[in-house]
Image (tube, helix red, strand yellow):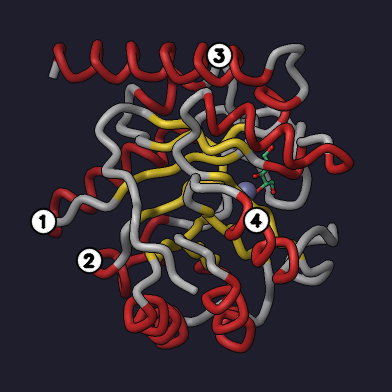
């Protein structure tokens, strides 16, 4: 089942990562961030191979797609995306993100084509050490580029200093090629780091601990969003 409605992101939007949610009361946590204006619900799929951790998968995506109206952005930290992609499409993911490191250029083109043919938003992710050139084969074809600001695998890690430079590099590369994919940043994003990446052009901020470990996740979400948006507006007014 594919859902049609997807928001157009002009303001900075937050994508709460349910890896940090209270999984026993997941429905309540999702309802509260949905009401606070979450852009996507971010689902971290880890296979214990591409990354050391093992998390959630197709059955949960399927249930969430029926549970919430907020689009699902599914971050695939898996070694074999070509094989598993159809399962996640069928489960109702709205946006699927594959890692550039999991595939060669030809494989990347192939998965992005599979997503487009299925009517799912397509995204490609870069680990911190991966140069932006890795997304060159698909940059014009993707809806979003995900810049990792921690090593993928666990929530609650600290933002890797300088990750905002990679956001700037993606923006530059996209401009040179005449395209404008959304840019999402994932890892260690909260009130102090959101301004760094939003000032460089980030549209979407994945927040795990900064939202779900807060006393009031809904107000934490709104606060990070407002701070990120201010930084982006300031940067735009200077440019
Ligand atoms: C890490 C995941 C992230 C993680 C973010 O591999 O991709 O989405 O849940 O968590 P925080 O915001 O706590 O760093
Ligand atoms: Zn993630």
Residue 121 x, y percent position in the rendering = 38, 64
For label 2, count other residues whose C-alpha is less than 10 Å away and answer few (under 14), some (14-19) or many (20+). some
Q: CA distance from mark 4 to mark 3?
A: 27 Å
Disc 3 target residue: 191
Q: Which residue is mark 2?
A: 140
Assign a secondary structure to mark 4.
helix
What's the residue at 18%, 19% (across, down)? 236
User: Which residue is denoted by mark 1 in the rendering?
Assistant: 178
Establish if 130 lies above or below 175.
Answer: below
Ranked by sequence position, the earlier of labels 3 and 1 is 1
Q: Earlier in the sequence, mark 2 or mark 4?
A: 4
Name which residue lies at 40% across and 69% down: 120
Q: CA distance from mark 3 to mark 1?
A: 31 Å
Residue 126, x across and y down, in percent: 51, 56
The answer to whether residue 13 is left or right of residue 54 is left
Residue 189: percent from left, percent from top: 58, 27
Q: SS class of the residue under badge 2?
A: helix
Badge nearest the viewer, 1 or 4: 4
Residue 100: % across, % down: 50, 68
Give the class, few, some or many, for how many residues have Cα within 10 Å of label 3's Cα (few <14, many ≥20).
some
Quickly name the residue at label 4.
64
- At horizontal 56% and vertical 21% (from top left) the residue drawn is 221
- Label 1 near label 2: C-beta < 8 Å? yes
Q: Are marks 1 and 4 in contact (CB under 8 Å)?
A: no
Mark 2 and mark 3 lie on one chain; the one further toward the N terminus is 2
Local SS, label 1: loop
Q: Earlier in the sequence, mark 4 or mark 3?
A: 4
Residue at the far right in the pictured view: 24
């Amino acid at each position: 089942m594919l859902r049609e409605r997807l928001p157009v992101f002009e303001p900075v939007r937050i994508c709460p990562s349910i890896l940090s949610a209270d999984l026993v009361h997941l429905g309540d946590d999702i309802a509260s961030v949905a009401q606070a204006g979450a852009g996507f619900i971010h689902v971290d799929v880890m296979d214990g191979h591409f990354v050391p951790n093992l998390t959630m998968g197709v059955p949960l995506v399927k249930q969430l797609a029926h549970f919430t109206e907020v689009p699902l952005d599914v971050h695939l930290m898996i070694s074999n995306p070509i094989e598993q992609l159809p399962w996640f499409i069928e489960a109702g993911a709205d946006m699927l993100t594959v890692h550039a490191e999991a595939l060669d250029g030809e494989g990347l083109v192939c998965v992005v084509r599979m997503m487009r043919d299925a009517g799912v938003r397509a995204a490609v992710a870069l680990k911190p050490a991966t140069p932006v050139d890795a997304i060159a084969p698909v940059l014009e074809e993707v809806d979003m580029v995900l810049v990792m600001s921690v090593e993928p695998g666990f929530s609650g890690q600290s933002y890797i200093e300088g990750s905002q430079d990679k956001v700037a590099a993606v923006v530059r590369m996209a401009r040179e090629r005449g395209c404008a994919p959304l840019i999402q940043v994932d890892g260690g994003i909260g009130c102090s780091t959101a301004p760094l990446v939003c000032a460089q052009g980030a549209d979407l901020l994945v927040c795990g601990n900064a939202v779900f470990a807060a006393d009031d996740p809904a107000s934490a979400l709104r606060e990070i969003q407002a701070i990120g948006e201010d930084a982006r507006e300031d940067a735009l007014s200077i440019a």
